[in-house]
Image (cartoon, rainbow, N blue to C red):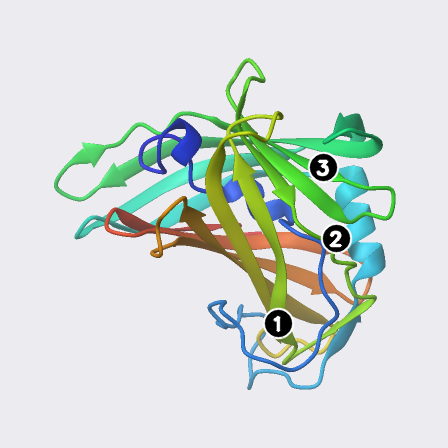
Amino acid sequence: MHVPFRQNAKLIRSVVSATFLVSLAACGSGSSSGSSSSTSSGSGAPATNVSVAMTSALNAFVTDGTTISNMTIAGTYGSASATGTASYTLLPAASTTFAGNSTDSAQAATLVTSSLNVSGTGAVSVPTTYSTFVWDVSTNLVGMTLNDSSSNVLEYDVATSVVAFPSTITIGGSGSLATFNRYTDSTMSTSLGTIDTAYSVVANGSSTTSVVFELTEQIYDTGSSNPNSVTYDFVVNAGGTMSLKSIEINDLGTFDLTYTNPD
């Protein structure tokens, strides 16, 4: 996005990236760099030892896309509180060529921040953000782009390795995923930095038929050791569905905002 999410080549990953930034690695033990907070679902103690299928849920999410028209925004902008509203649209995948591979599929995503109000300041303008997610024939994420309203590329991100997503995810699973190299365009001649990704699986409240899959990005500019971060929460159900629940976007020194799907 643009203000407050960084300009052009320095764009932070916005909520549009929430759709699945990298193919998911096999769940197992290990530390997570995600936020590890549970999403409320029902009453009672958090569930334990819940496992759900991931493959069918992710495939449906990629094939069908999704629309969320009533997201809410809450958090801080500088030292002040901030609230707002937004909508998000992810189109079904369509054939494309990416990094020389003509068998990939691309999904276009659009985030519209309808309002962002900062205490003591008032309304802050956030232009619409456009992104594309690129998948191979096995539904592994191989790349991403950030674009302007005319589909011109502002950032071109290429995975350094393909990580096959797990067939099943289980509460307590966590680990590192792939690294993406960030470039200014498809020539991949000018580096912008890297994106490191990790995941964890936590309880969806007391639910015994769903879990929350948390995906965290650490976004580094070239020459910087202080990343911005984005954490995405997806609810994955035993019935084979996957939905975006929330995204926390933390731009160091500027803002910490959470976009939430209330449904």
For this view, does 21 lie left or right of residue 97?
left
Q: What is the C-alpha distance between the residues marked 2 and 3?
A: 12 Å
85 lies above or below 146: below
Q: Which residue is mark 2?
A: 162
For this view, does 253 lie left or right of residue 2?
left
Q: Position of residue 98 (x, y in %)?
A: 73, 30
**Observer-nearest residue: 158 or 141?**
158
- One can see residue 4 in this view: yes
Identify which amino acid the numbered label 2 is placed on: Val
Q: Position of residue 234 (x, y in %)?
A: 62, 58
Which residue is pictured at 53% across the width and 73% down the height? 32
Q: Which residue is mark 3?
A: 134
For this view, does 221 lie left or right of residue 179?
left
262 lies above or below 236: above
- Report crowding for label 2: few under 14, some 14 to 19, many 20 or more residues within 10 A (C-alpha): some
Q: Quadrant of residue 226?
A: bottom left
Q: Contact, CB < 8 Å: mark 2 with mark 1? A: no
Q: Which residue is mark 1?
A: 175
- One can see residue 91 in this view: no
Q: Nearer the viewer, mark 2 or mark 1?
A: 2
Counting residues from the start of the chain, the first of labels 1 and 3 encountered is 3
